[in-house]
Amino acid sequence: MKLITNIHQLLVTGEFNTPVSGQAMSQMPFISDAYLLIKDDRIHDYGAMKDVPTIEGAEILDATGRIVLPMWCDSHTHLVYATGREDEFVDRINGLSYEEIANRGGGILNSVARLRAMDEDVLYEDALKRLQQLIQLGTGAIEIKSGYGLSVAAEKKMLNVIARLKKQAAIPIKATLLGAHAIPKEYKDNREGYIQLIIEEMIPTFAKEGLCDFIDIFCESGYFTVAEMEAILDAGKKYGLQPKVHVNQFNAIGGIAAAVKYDALSVDHLEELTEEDIKALTGSNTISVALPGCSFFLGIPYTPARQIIDAGLPLAIATDYNPGSSPSGNMNFVVAQACIQLRMTPEEAIIAATINGAFAMDVASDTGSITKGKKANLMITTPQKSYNAIPYRFGQHQIEQLIVNGLPI
Ligand code: NIG
Ligand code: FE
């Protein structure tokens, strides 16, 4: 057993049967001057130092002055991709918009061409390296989407890579089928045909092979309509795939209400949000996910987090790590942005990046909080006055030691 002693602040402690919503997000459940006991790969016990048990032969880790918290849960990424798109980055600096770049064949379709040409083993090795870097930055669970293949063979190649990462990685991973990320160029004049391909081939084949946990679609002007989303979510539902969808990134076209109708686990982006959208989310089980790295990188509005939380809803935050709109998978930076740009308090941001993120990808039974029986996937910070320092010192993470599955790495 391992015993972490003298923890200055131990957060996010307790039992969580549902995501933390609204006002409750402003209360950090934590213990000052705490201990935490690890048995094998799990959290065995924790509490105040005054009650610390004496354990014969336990390995002691002294955390005087340090904060201990669960590793970040990044519920929205496109981690598997072929190469970066630095050329488009420079085009945008020189004045082109994300949409203009996409319209002239760049954007998602650029990544599609590159991924189709890449061997599965190379894709896997690159993705594994990225994943290992993210773990070093404190990511302890991650969702990864397909969506740069857009053919049965290439989507399968991406999902195979995610399946191999699941086997290899030390952290929980969830796979999402995003066949409806864009219309591939060979279906440019036959979008109907592409939707049919997703519904009749991709969903049944990949679901039967157990290659995906969730279904996603980019519901947006210029990409997929609300009616197309409903058709795809309906097909997914028949195979038990719960939706986690891209909606309201550039325009509010009614995707949120439709996603809620299909019992979406999460609706992600929400940079554009209407009163109607908030109404649709109220009383539902759907979690809103903000992706501030994307707003930062593209220079588009930030998700109105205050409006969402103040309406009593749960909110998670994630990186959206992808080569086009958010080429960083650093959750520490996302937590800082949540405070600085979304005006979330440190309590709200940390809860959004841990337990709520875990719920937004259905891994909360195993991770996302300091709870007896959950995986011991923990971050120990450098000495800090309080957990407020975590978002305050933006751009430089405060992690001194990581513990993954009970083992210091
Ligand atoms: O989440 N919005 C759609 N998809 C990605 C961007 C993908 C890309 O540009 O490669 C996103 O922002
Ligand atoms: Fe995304």
Image (spheres, rainbow, N blue to C red):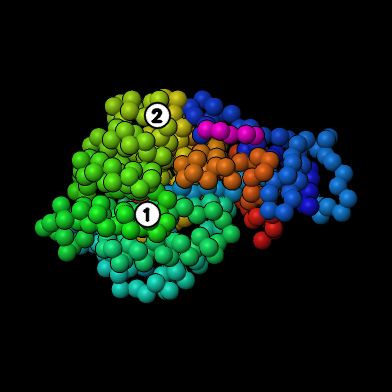
Question: How far separated are the C-alphas under marks 2 and 1?
Answer: 25 Å
Q: Is mark 1 within 8 Å of ligand 2?
A: no
Prevailing SS of the magenta stretch = loop
- What residue appears at the point 75 percent right and 36 percent down from the top-left corner? 47
Question: In this figure, which residue is indicated by the disc labeled 2?
Answer: 284
Query: Which quadrant: the C terminus?
Result: bottom right
Tell me the amino acid under the disc marked 1: Ala
Splitting the image into 4 quarters, where does residue 264 fall?
A: top left
Give how far across and how far down residue 185 sits, in percent. Answer: 18, 62
Secondary structure under tag 1 reads helix
Among the two numbered marks 2 and 1 on one chain, the one whose residue lies closer to the N terminus: 1
Is residue 7 on the magenta stretch? no
Farthest-out residue, left: 189
Whether 309 is drawn above or below 74: the answer is above
- What residue appears at the point 57 percent right and 42 percent down from the top-left corner? 365
Secondary structure under tag 2 reads loop
Question: In this figure, which residue is indicated by the disc labeled 1?
Answer: 207
Compare residues 221 and 284 and report the one nearer the observer. 284
Residue 255 shows in this picture:
yes
Tell me the amino acid under the disc marked 2: Ser
Q: Is residue 79 left or right of residue 387?
A: left
Structural crowding at the residue carrying mark 2, measured as other residues with C-alpha within 10 Å and reported as few (<14), some (14–19) or many (≥20): some
Whether 35 is drawn above or below 165: the answer is above
Is residue 17 on the magenta stretch? yes
Give how far across and how far down residue 65 sits, in percent. Answer: 74, 44
Residue 298 shows in this picture:
no
Give how far across and how far down residue 60 sits, in percent. Answer: 81, 52
Structural crowding at the residue carrying mark 1, measured as other residues with C-alpha within 10 Å and reported as few (<14), some (14–19) or many (≥20): some
Give how far across and how far down residue 339 sits, in percent. Answer: 49, 38
Splitting the image into 4 quarters, where does residue 256 fall?
A: top left
- What residue appears at the point 22 percent right and 57 percent down from the top-left corner? 197
- Magenta residues, as a range? 14-18
